[in-house]
Amino acid sequence: MQKILIVEDNVLISRSIESKLKEEMFEVKAVFNGEDAINQFNLIKYDAVLLDLMLPIKSGEEVLKHIRSKGDVPLLFLQRIQTLKKQ
């Protein structure tokens, strides 16, 4: 079973992605800040990482640099874009 690390500080988004990946039979671990992402990445060999760039404690860029320093794991970047409503 392939292991996926989700790094997303929005719990609703993270849980939604996690649920879908588990339905597809992936083993999934979700963390919610950059520091936990680095710690978790050091513990387990992941097959891919879904990474939000705007994270608390350590930024997504810091997490990215750490992951790249350890090898060549596939990464998919998550980015939520807010739009302004016309009034």
Image (cartoon, rainbow, N blue to C red):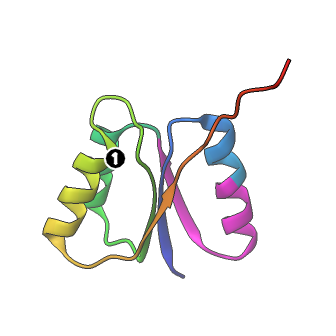
Query: Residue lying furthest left in this view?
Result: 69
Nearer the observer, 44 or 48: 48
Q: Residue at x 67, y 76 (%)?
A: 25
Res 84 → quadrant: top right
Residue behind mark 1: 60
Whether 41 is drawn above or below 73: the answer is above
> Which residue is located at x 69 percent, y 34 percent?
83
Residue at position x 58%, y 35% in the image: 10
User: Left of 78 or right of it: where is 20?
Assistant: right
Q: What residue type is disc 1 on?
A: Gly
- Judged from the image, the secondary structure of the residue bearing numbered disc 1 is helix
In the foreground, 55 or 35: 55
Q: How dense is the environment of label 1, judged by Cα within 10 Å: few (below 14), some, or many (20 and up)?
A: many
Magenta extent: 17-31
- For this orientation, the residue located farthest to the right is 87
Q: Quadrant of the C terminus?
A: top right
